[in-house]
Amino acid sequence: MNKRVYEIAGTVMLIISIIMYFIYWGDDFVLEKGRFPFVCNKAENYTISHFENSYPPNKILIIGGVYKSGKSRALQELSKRYLSLKQLPVEIHISRANTFDNLVDLVKSDLVRNFMTLSKTLPRSKMEEFSQMNWKTRAFNEKHGELGNGFAGAQLAAENALEMLHNNKTIIDGLNELLDVLERINDILPVNIFIHSADKIKELKTKDGQNIGKVIMDYALKYFENHYKKHSTIRIALEVIDSRIIAKVKDINGVFVVVLKEIDNPLQTMHSLGIFRHEEGKPIYKLVGGQTAALYHAFMEKKYGTNPYTIAKMHFDEDFAEVKKLMTNTSNTAWFDLCFGPLYNATNISFLDSLFKEGYVYSDENSTTYAGSAAVRAAFCAITPKKYKPKEIKVEKPKSKGKKSKSPSQSPSPKPTPTSTPTPSPSATPVQSAKPSPSVSPPNTPSPSPTPVPSVSPSPSPSPKPEKKSGWFSKKEKPTPKPKSAEIKVETKADSKKVTPEKKEEKKVETKSEEKKTLEKPKDSKKQDQAKPETTQPIKVEDKSSKVDEKKSKEEAKKMKSSEKKESKGWFSKKEKQTPTPSPSKSPVPSPSISPSPKPEKKEKATPSPSASPKPAKKSGWFSKK
């Protein structure tokens, strides 16, 4: 007893220690101490990495999607990566500039900064190649003369090309010169251009108020189309806020399209990145979902001791109020549909322009419109009637129809054997549901007679019509209860003694009687539907017809007498086990069995099965002896 007590105590302590380990020490959460990491889903990450490693690098990447989802952050990460690989990144932040002149100054300062960092890391071989290159420009030879050689000459050539853009008359020439200088630098040092908020180019104006954004936009579209054809080796990546431009540019050769959406499974993703624990992040994800902007602000304020949920709730309320201000024509059903899901191939949605420009609503390459975040969907659902049913649910109905169409195939009807007389045999269906034995005839062959003729001399089995079978059998199957199958078995055991000495009349019902029976069944089928008299089976009629052929079949019966004794016993003993339920219209006739019941119940003979033949014929022949 003491040993058992020690064993039980030891196992309990081991289990407790394992549980404590997983609770306190098993958590692999490590809080991120730096900046909020760049996060995107697997599909978008794969496309970005494919663009990054593509060769030749004459590809264009266009990033769109949810507002504040990390589109600009993705370009910044690519720029840092290329700079670490000793490549020249040229970043153009259009959203930071008020005018076109400010934009030119921003690009120039960023270019000079990147040149300075590369000058410290480039090997001497690259610097010698720069010194051997002539950096003269066609536009500035008269004004500036010859530019310096080497790395400084390339920097000055790029700056002078940018200065040319200040003059409205030489904008196109300045763009050509800038791209020409970048192509020459690219022969020595790979160049990558990153344009932030590229769709804002249309809004650019000069100091005088002239709108030159359309001119630059048209020039950029033509350059993108010829970029792949000319086999240019400059990588270009764009970030757009209004994602409707993606559907227009997706067919251009060499264009990669990425649509950043909400983070999938934010609970596990944020935990693995060290942003929020499971218990801490669950209420935040229920509120804002996988919106990167709300998670970013909640994480940054968490470092200063603020509750992250309150920051996420504040961000949610701000977006909700901003969307409500921008909403117009609120009676349109498109608002209601966006509450339940995306809009597929929507037309006449110009009232969504203000939301598209701010990124609260976005579309993918298939022109499918989505709500940007949980706050945006909440604003749409606030004006949606409670009884409204979205149109997109109707699109999914063909899938449910497809499932319904599979139901008949899952329960197929028994394969009918080809015969000349198609007569429905509903009594065969219960036999088929049981385990069939190899000696039993096909389930479609009607065998009401007690003779085991099908096993000895198989006659052409009549094939049932599937249409009549399904409809006629379903009506007859309902009134037949399962317990009455036992009554039929009792009758067969009780009457087996009477059947065995009368083998002569069993031979009467052979192949000819079965063929006549199959012809008579369709005539009686109508009467079976009209009335269901509780009488015996249609063997009565078959016995009358068999008397005419008695003399002809007498000689054959004597020859088959010895063989049928053995086969009738084995065949019917198996068949009784295979028929768990009686047929709705034709219950099997009392057949001889090997083990007859010693105490037959005569009361059960007086109560015939409800599934009897509808033809009330007089008792005659063999059955009259019963």
Image (cartoon, helix red, strand yellow):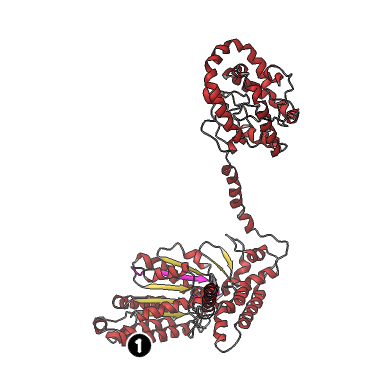
Q: Is residue 354 left or right of residue 212?
A: right
Q: Main secondary structure of the magenta part?
A: loop
Q: Residue 405 falls in which quadrant of the image?
A: top right
Q: Is residue 460 visible?
A: no
Residue beneath the point at 61% across and 47% down: 404
Q: Amino acid at mark 1?
A: Met
Q: Nearer the viewer, residue 578 or 503?
A: 503
- Give coordinates of residue 202: x percent, y percent: 51, 74
Q: Residue 551 falls in which quadrant of the image?
A: top right
State the residue lying farthest toward the top: 551
Range of residues picked out in magenta = 54-70
Q: Is residue 302 visible?
A: yes
Name above or below for residue 403 compared with residue 120.
above
SS for callout 1: helix
- Give coordinates of residue 322: x percent, y percent: 64, 77
Name above or below for residue 358 compared with residue 612.
below
Q: How many marks?
A: 1
**Crowd rating for badge 1 (residues with CA inside 10 Å; few <14, some 14–19, many 20+):** few
Q: Is residue 585 magenta?
A: no
- Give coordinates of residue 130: x percent, y percent: 27, 82
Q: Name the residue carrying label 1.
A: 116
Residue beneath the point at 33% across and 83% down: 157
Q: Nearer the viewer, residue 141 or 427?
A: 427
Residue beneath the point at 50% across and 63% down: 365
Q: Is residue 159 left or right of residue 64?
A: left
The N terminus lies in which quarter of the figure?
Answer: bottom right
Q: Nearer the viewer, residue 278 or 39?
A: 278
